[in-house]
Image: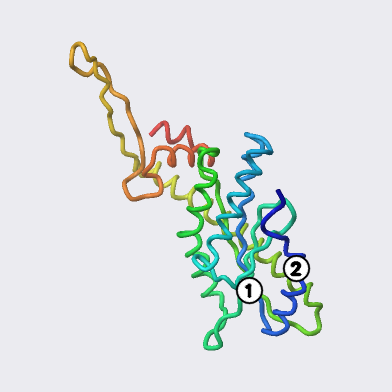
Amino acid sequence: MPDSIRTYHEHLPYLTEELIKNGELSLMLLDISPFNAIEEQYGIQTYTLVRQRLFALLSEQAGKDFRKEDILALEEPAGLRILLFLSPRRKSSTNSYESLESLRLRLISVLIPKLLRTAQPYLKTPPAISIGFALGIYNPLVAPHHIVLRIIREALEHADWQYRTEEMQTMQRLREVILNEEVITLYQPIFDLREEKPMGYEALSRGNAGTAFESPNDLFNAAIKHRLLVELDHR
């Protein structure tokens, strides 16, 4: 089945026209490429099915999580970098980096959880989906399609920067958890049903309630990813 979302190349004439007419063009980029792990673990048929579900979900969210007039596109055929070209704002307001950041945060809180559910049966650890944005200004001295390409490149760089920044913050916070011994251990009794008394206890460690490490899986997966498992185990 062909992709239900076309590449930006097919939208390029319209995008350049909008850039010239409005004097600007804004883009929100969702990097969902970590979903590629599904193909490596389960094969192309499963990956294709998940990808189709992903695209169907994105199409359904038009008019809900983003405007119907916004244009969904792929960076490249068979890729998983989603480009969301934003429709012009009302005359009473203009696009700004502040408004783009507000939209990015809203997509993270509302749209990303929906996208992650499409991969839930196949990926035990939720993949990191990063979102970046860019705001381009029309320059009559530069070919419009070159400006569109620049916008895509800047949004991709911003998404990568956001991902690296969040990973660094996670690592720093995890080190603080270990150094400050902010680890809670709960004990699950293992009962001897015949004697009706505990025969032992299973120790279950986690971070403090209300933190990003409240789940044992999140705590230890982060420790593995950032090579801090030995230090965490010692605590």
Q: Position of 157 compared to 118: left or right? A: right
Q: Which mark is residue 26?
A: 1
Tell which residue pokes out farthest to the front in this image: 1
Q: Which mark is residue 75?
A: none
State the SS at label 1.
strand
Look at 49% across and 53% down and name the residue there: 114
Tell which residue pokes out farthest to the top in this image: 194
Q: Position of residue 181 (x, y in %)?
A: 35, 41
Q: Position of residue 113 (x, y in %)?
A: 48, 53
178 relative to 74, above or below: above
Along the line of sight, the residue nearer the viewer: 104 or 176: 104
11 relative to 49, above or below: below
Look at 24% across and 19% down and name the residue there: 191
Where is mark 2, residue-wise? 149
Look at 62% across and 57% down and name the residue there: 160
Q: Position of residue 154 (x, y in %)?
A: 68, 66
Q: Quadrant of the C terminus?
A: top left
Q: Amino acid at mark 2?
A: Leu
Q: Position of residue 6 (x, y in %)?
A: 71, 60
